[in-house]
Every structure is written in C-alpha cells, then in structure tokens.
Image (cartoon, rainbow, N blue to C red):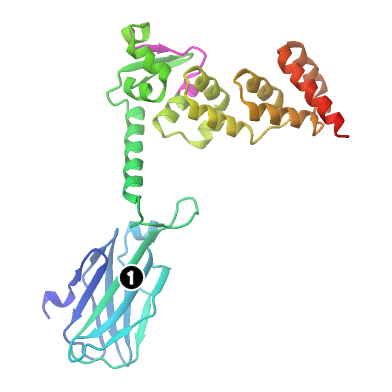
Amino acid sequence: MTESAYRVETTARLAQWRIDNLASCTYRKSDPFKIGNWNWHLSLEKNRVLYVKLYPEISNLTRDNPPIASFIIRVVCSAGDRKAFTHPEIKDKQLKSNEDFVWPIEVPLTGKFIIDVEFLDLKTASPNDGEPCSIWAEGLTQKQSNATALACLGRMLTQSIHTDIIINASNGSIGAHRAVLSARSPVFHSMFSHNLQEKELSTINISDMSIEACQALLCYIYGNIKHEEFLAHRLALLRAADKYDISDLKEACHESLLEDIDTKNVLERLQNAALYQLPKLKSSCMRYLVRFGKIYDIRDDFNAFLLCAERELITDIFHEVLNTWKGF
C-alpha cells in the first residue's frame, strides 16, 4: 500500500482522507494532520460494520488542553452519483482519545470513498473555568499577542534585561526601565524628562516603601503581579499610586479595599479613604461603623481614633450618626 493511502489532505478547516479500497476485517489509521493547534488522526475499522473515528494525537497539549470540537463528518462515495452519508453535526464535543468520537456505518461501502471532515469550530477550555474560547475567534490573535508582550515585559523585570534605572527602597534595591516607568506614570515621566537628580544619577529613592512593596508596584506596572502579592501590599500600592499618579492602580486598590472591611481594619481604611480621597471606601467604612453598629465593638479604638483624626473627617462621621438616627 502506498504512502498516499494514509495521507490526509487539508485546508485551514477541512480534512479529506481518500480511501481506494478497504478489505473486510481491516484496520487503517491515517497519518497525522494539522488542524488548528492539534495534530489529528482518522481511523477506520471494518468488520461487519465500518467504524470511523476522529481524535487528536496524544501529546502534552492534548492532555493539558484537549480540543473542544464542532464539526460535520461525511463519507462520500467517489464513484457514480457520489452518494454521501452525513453524521449529524457534532457541537462542542471534547476529544481526548480515540473512543470519544466513534461513528458506526452499517451501510456497506465498496470501491473508493472519501472521509470528509469540516471543522466548524475548535475551542480550548478557559483556565479560570469560564466559557471555552474559540481558537478562531475574532481578536484571538490580538489577545495572544498581548499575552506574549506582557510575558516578555515581565521577563525584562524579573531577569533585569537592560535595566537603566535603580530604585532604592527602604531595605533594598531593584532595577527597572525608564521607558516603562515613564509610560505608566506622568510623575516618573517628568523625572526623566527634566534635569532632576533621578535623571542624572539614574536612581529613584522610594524610602517609604519596603523592597517587597516596591517589587509589587513594579510587577503591577509591568503587568505580571500575582493576586496574593497585590492583596498583601494594597495600602503601600495605594500610597504609591497616589504619589506617582497611576490612576488605574489607585482605582484597583480602591475597589479591592471595599471587599473585606472588618473591625480590625475599618479605622485604618477610613483614614486612608479620607487621605487619598476615596469616596466609596469612606462611605462604606462609615456605614459599617454607624449603620451596622460596629462602632460599639471597637469603642476604645474608635475613641482613640477621634483624638487624632482630621476635623473634617470627624464631622462627616457625626453627620453619618445623625442621618442614621433620623432613620429610626
């Protein structure tokens, strides 16, 4: 049997396997063919019934990210009037092994025929248990490009690739890139655009941040911060975002600090809300203290807080108390 007997012809989404002759009690498996991100096989097993199988080649990619396929498969007789047998459309079926799609054809086939597979869509599972994503979806190339660019940007930081500025934190130093910092912060941009000390000495002194918090700030700027790292340094990141005018980071900290207010942190967050002009956080903290009565659970701490708080903030708290009393 010639090599062409196992070859599958393909276009971007179509695969055809031409069978010249298939004897009884026969098993035949095609050469691998590439559709989408995966190599595929077709196989035939003929006894009393002809079984047609479609499956991805076993690989790390298939194990870790098996395809979720939508396709139409047909068997077309080459001779005469080209009679065709069509399987009902397969929709969003995950294929991992050669047992995941098996089509038994009980009609006897003789002579030459073609197995024709038209791939309608191929999807991969979302890493966050979201909806599967089509590899052919509009914008996927852009998403992949953005992800690759972010990964490279992250490596520039973690591997200190061509760094040209040193940031001195309170307990250590780390290298960074002027261009990246300038693009993310108008304050950094101004530092490097004028003849300031930072430009001349190629250093930035951030003595009010630990090296760990500074690392978290840079990871956010470079697009590769981990969620746990962000949570651990939210207040330091908020201060830095306000100081260096990184508005998206400030808003991210603002939204995050709203999510886990409790009696241990509410006074500190109220103080920061007033200091950095975070209206939603300020309102939420005051409601938590006054409307939900948590002020009584931390009475001593609250009294100490009033002794050092700004007069305007104290006034706002008492307005909240009065408004709450009016509601009863």
SS at mark 1 in the image = strand
| Viewer-nearest residue: 183 or 159 | 183
Which residue, given by chain and number where applicable, does mark 1 sit on? 55
Residue appearing at x 48%, y 15% in the figure: 171
Give x and y (percent) for residue 33: 23, 66
Q: Is residue 318 shown in magenta?
A: no
Give x and y (percent) for residue 134: 38, 58
- Is 295 placed left or right of 30 in the picture? right
**Above or below 306: residue 322:** below
Residue appearing at x 36%, y 56% in the figure: 137
For the record, the magenta segment spans 201-214
Residue appearing at x 53%, y 27% in the figure: 250
Residue furthest toward the left?
2
Give x and y (percent) for residue 234: 56, 27
**Above or below 286: residue 115:** below
The picture quadrant where one finds residue 157 is: top left
Three-letter amino acid code of the residue under disc 1: Tyr
Total label count? Answer: 1
Give x and y (percent) for residue 147: 36, 42
| Viewer-nearest residue: 19 or 59 | 19
The picture quadrant where one finds residue 194 is: top left
Query: Does residue 309 appear in this view?
Result: no
Query: Crowding at label 1, few (<14), some or many (≥20) Cα neighbours within 10 Å?
Result: many
- Is 179 placed left or right of 113 in the picture? right
Which quadrant: the N terminus?
A: bottom left
Query: Does residue 58 appear in this view?
Result: yes
The picture quadrant where one finds residue 161 is: top left
